[in-house]
Image (cartoon, grey):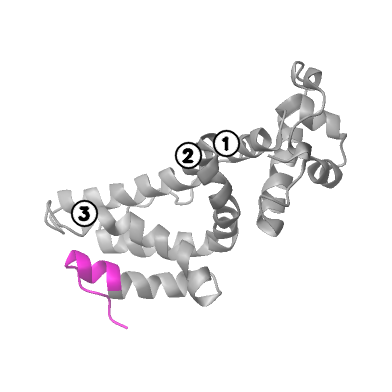
Amino acid sequence: MSPQDVAPDPAHTTRRSKITPERAQEFYAAVLDMLRESGYEALTMEGVASRTRCGKSTLYRQWGSKPELVVAALHGTRQALLPHIDTGTLAGDLREAVRAIGEGSGRDTPLMHALSHAALQSPELLCALREALILPALAAIDEMVRRGAERGEIPADSPAAEFVSAQLLGVMRVRPLLEGTYADEAYLTRFVENAVLPSLGLGASAP
């Protein structure tokens, strides 16, 4: 951890200033935007203070260090990657899911890439990243698959069922590395039609 990541005066962390929820959201939004733009290593408390037009001491008093501020930003802006989806069929649910994932890919993928390396070295940051972005999406997709099995659309012991969420979130993450572009709705739809649905024994829709 670099010197600028931690408050130089320990007394700064013993007293919390009064920051309104609205002002805190401004800080959180700035932190996440800067992570998407430049990555975790380039993020500094000084940079956040400049972006949000506040004193650096205010950030240190409230959060103490860069990792604490990033964790707070992830928790404080937690949004479901997937809305509640229930079309009545598993295939319909997955098609709606990739539409939603594709719409948010340009926002969520850069953030996950920016934090992945640092998160592997910080259990607290990894936990916050998983809770804010990853686990809710995994749970939503797993629920779609569970309902599909209950309706008899796929066998209850389908060997492919446990991998659906990993497939969808994994391809969102990996496409920028392989092809230099985000996994948009059109790409994800093709992926579902030609890889996910056939693996579950469900027919793809007509072209």
Which amino acid type corresponds to the residue marked 2 in the rendered image? Answer: Glu
Give me the disc on residue 131.
2
Work out which quarter of the rendered image holds the C terminus and state it: bottom left
Which amino acid type corresponds to the residue marked 3 in the rendered image? Answer: Gly
* CA gap, disc 1 and disc 3: 31 Å
Which amino acid type corresponds to the residue marked 1 in the rendered image? Answer: His
Question: Going from the N terminus, do you reach mark 2 or mark 1 first?
Answer: 1
Q: Which residue is mark 1?
A: 75
* CA gap, disc 2 and disc 3: 25 Å
Q: Mark 2 Cα within 10 Å, few/some/many (few <14, many 20+)?
A: some
Q: Are marks 2 and 1 in contact (CB under 8 Å)?
A: yes
Does the segment drawn in magenta span residue 198? yes
Q: Which residue is mark 3?
A: 148
Q: Position of residue 54 (x, y in %)?
A: 86, 37
Q: Quadrant of residue 93?
A: bottom left
Q: Residue at x 68, y 39 (%)?
A: 1
Span of residues in magenta: 195-207
Front-most of 133 and 104? 133
Relative vertical location of residue 184 with respect to residue 155 in this rendering, above or below: below
